[in-house]
Image (spheres, rainbow, N blue to C red):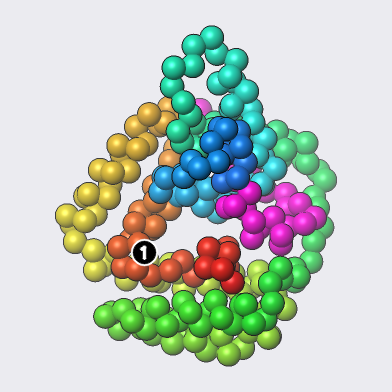
Amino acid sequence: MHESTPSPIPPPDWPTNYFNYFTEIEDHFQRARGASLFLLSPLDWALIAAWKNAGIPLEAVLKGIDAAFEKWRSRKSRTRQVNSLAYCAQAVQEEAQRLADVATGQPVARSHQSAAPFTIEALANYLRANAEALLQSPHTPIQELGLQLRALATDADALITDIEDLELRLTAMEEKLLAQLRLAQSDEALLAARRDLETQLRPHRSKMSVEQLRQLEEQYLAKRLLDASRLPRLSLFYMTDYGF
């Protein structure tokens, strides 16, 4: 029986950790692997996004990476290098469960209005840039989402007071965006994406739960769709990817 994903207990410095999640994990994996020039694959990025969406604390991911590499280094034979974050998936899940067990009955109180780790100007620029990208789409429903984003950009000073509520709005808009892209995708493109995903996942399936695999597949296919259409992610989580 697969363990269920534990409910996350947000750390006190939640806003900062939230927006540094990708880079912290990337840097830590590179250091653990001993190769600073190693580039994460699309599968790796999708896995990080799946962890983030599942509420896996950053601390659990970093400790899980360390545990996985410690186990790998303890082997007598290490003919294969660790070339994917997926190798650490099981250890990350175990660390997340351990943290959840420790925190049981000790919920961390936090305000629904977390301080934003970026400026009003940066937020407005990010929303505006994404709006302009969506407005270039040939699909009318996506253009309409672009107009909604443009309107949000003009209200950045008010929106920044509650970034969690704004993130919920942007997540809902991104779901609509992906739904439109799926409708426009050809059967051949969908099949090619699923074949690529299966090729990359095959060595790691036994280390992941059904829920982990589902989330990873969802994130990977979403990234493929957006990359093929040259459209951005809308979540605030990706602000640092664009230099804002």
Q: Residue at x 44, y 87 (%)?
A: 147
**Spot occupied by residue 243 in the image (x, y as percentages of width and height):** 56, 68
Is residue 105 toward the left or the right of residue 173 in the image?
A: right
Where 197 sits versus 126, above or below? Answer: above
| Residue 228 appears in the rendering | yes
Foreground of the two, 244 or 145: 244
- Residue range in magenta is 1-25
Q: Helix or strand or loop: what does disc 1 sit on? A: helix
**Spot occupied by residue 31 in the image (x, y as percentages of width and height):** 61, 37
**Spot occupied by residue 51 in the image (x, y as percentages of width and height):** 55, 47
The image quadrant that residue 98 belongs to is: top right
Q: Residue at x 58, y 27 (%)?
A: 68
Amino acid bearing label 1:
Leu
Is residue 66 toward the left or the right of residue 213 in the image?
A: right
| Residue 160 forms part of the magenta stretch | no
**Spot occupied by residue 218 in the image (x, y as percentages of width and height):** 40, 52
Residue behind mark 1: 226
Where 62 sits versus 110, above or below? Answer: above
The image quadrant that residue 29 belongs to is: top right
